[in-house]
Image (cartoon, helix red, strand yellow):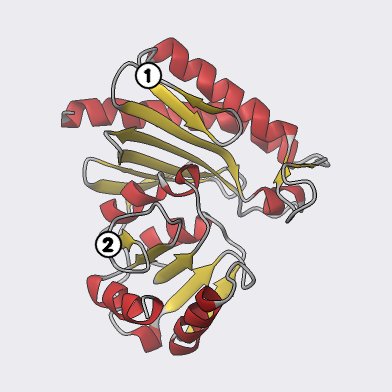
């Protein structure tokens, strides 16, 4: 895949995000009724806006790149003719969405041969779009765009960390995250994928989460890496299959976090 190809796909990802915004922004300003995808278990909300936004993006992909596969949170997988697959999460942070909070995002990635090569984190209510492709990251707003760059934090005791929910972890995972939290300078909760976006922009230094699925993390990987950050699992390698995700602003900070989380 050439740099020109990636530029084309990145531009198309922005077009997909525009289409999703056209659905999700009006819905976010109205009262949202959520269904529970996990009836009888932990509440897992989904709204009609989730479904409608994914339908819109799928239709655009099928029209523009009919040979590409699609893997979306709401409607599963559609096989393609090659190794290129679009990974879609129309509303990441649906709990925030149904509470009228602005931190929910749309996640779009192009995965080639299992490796995410284009990633986009769109925060419609905040008016920010974070894009990673061809080794460069940028933050796009209505007034223009700027390059993304992580902070230069190298010391865990100076780090600003985040995770989606303090009750996300159970058992040994909870103990390990608690050790990490106590070593850091401060911790914030509740931002879902937006936490990774702010890490790429230099405002957060570490994100640690567990239980993520491919549509949750595919878009994050190119954005964090293009901004100069590190992203892997709690053991420090690039196997994301267990859903344990660790992102850090610098290699020093990543290694310090791995030393705690991998124990």
Percent position of residue 3, x then y: 17, 32
Labels in figure, total: 2
Q: Residue at x 29, y 62 (%)?
A: 229
Percent position of residue 132, x then y: 32, 45
Percent position of residue 128, x then y: 50, 47
- Residue farthest to the left, as pictured: 2
- Is there any visible trace of residue 204 in the rendered image? no
Residue 70, by quadrant, is top left
Residue 56, by quadrant, is top right
Q: CA distance from mark 2 to mark 1?
A: 28 Å
Is label 1 in a helix, a strand or a loop?
loop
Q: Quick one: quadrant of the N terminus?
A: top left
Read off the residue under disc 2.
237
Q: Identify which residue, 239 or 199, lies in the foreground.
A: 239
Horizontal side of residue 207 vs 255, given as left or right:
right
Horizontal side of residue 263 vs 121, given as left or right:
left
Horizontal side of residue 110 vs 95, given as left or right:
left
Label 2 crowd bin: few (<14), some (14–19), many (20+), radius 10 Å: few
Q: Quick one: quadrant of the C terminus?
A: bottom left
Q: Residue at x 47, y 31 (%)?
A: 71
Read off the residue under disc 1.
80
Is label 2 in a helix, a strand or a loop?
loop
Label 1 crowd bin: few (<14), some (14–19), many (20+), radius 10 Å: some
Q: Is residue 225 above or below residue 215?
A: below
Percent position of residue 73, x then y: 56, 36
Q: Identify which residue, 214 or 193, lies in the foreground.
A: 214
Horizontal side of residue 55 vs 161, given as left or right:
right
Q: Identify which residue, 111 or 125, lies in the foreground.
A: 111
- Is there any visible trace of residue 145 in the rendered image? yes
Q: Earlier in the sequence, mark 2 or mark 1?
A: 1
């Amino acid at each position: 895949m050439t740099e020109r190809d990636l530029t084309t796909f990145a531009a198309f990802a922005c077009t997909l995000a525009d289409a999703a915004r056209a659905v999700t922004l009006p819905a976010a300003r109205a009262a949202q009724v959520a269904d529970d995808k996990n009836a009888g278990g932990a509440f897992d909300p989904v709204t009609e806006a989730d479904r409608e936004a994914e339908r819109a993006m799928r239709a655009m992909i099928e029209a523009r790149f009919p040979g590409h596969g699609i893997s979306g949170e709401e409607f599963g997988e559609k096989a393609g003719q090659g190794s290129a697959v679009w990974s879609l999460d129309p509303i990441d942070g649906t709990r925030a969405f149904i509470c009228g909070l602005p931190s929910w995002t749309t996640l779009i990635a192009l995965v080639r041969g299992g490796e995410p090569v284009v990633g986009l984190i769109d925060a419609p209510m905040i008016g920010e779009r974070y894009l990673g492709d061809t080794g460069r990251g940028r933050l796009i707003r209505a007034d223009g765009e700027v390059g993304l760059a992580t902070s230069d934090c190298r010391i865990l005791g100076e780090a600003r960390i985040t995770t989606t929910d303090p009750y996300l972890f159970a058992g040994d995972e909870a103990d390990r995250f608690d050790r990490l939290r106590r070593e850091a300078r401060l911790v914030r909760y509740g931002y879902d994928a937006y936490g990774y976006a702010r890490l790429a922009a230099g405002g957060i230094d570490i994100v640690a989460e567990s239980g993520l699925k491919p549509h949750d993390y595919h878009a994050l990987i190119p954005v964090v890496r293009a901004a100069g950050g590190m992203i892997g699992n709690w053991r420090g390698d690039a196997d994301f299959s267990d859903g344990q995700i660790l992102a850090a602003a610098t290699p020093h900070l990543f290694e310090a976090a791995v030393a705690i989380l991998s124990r």
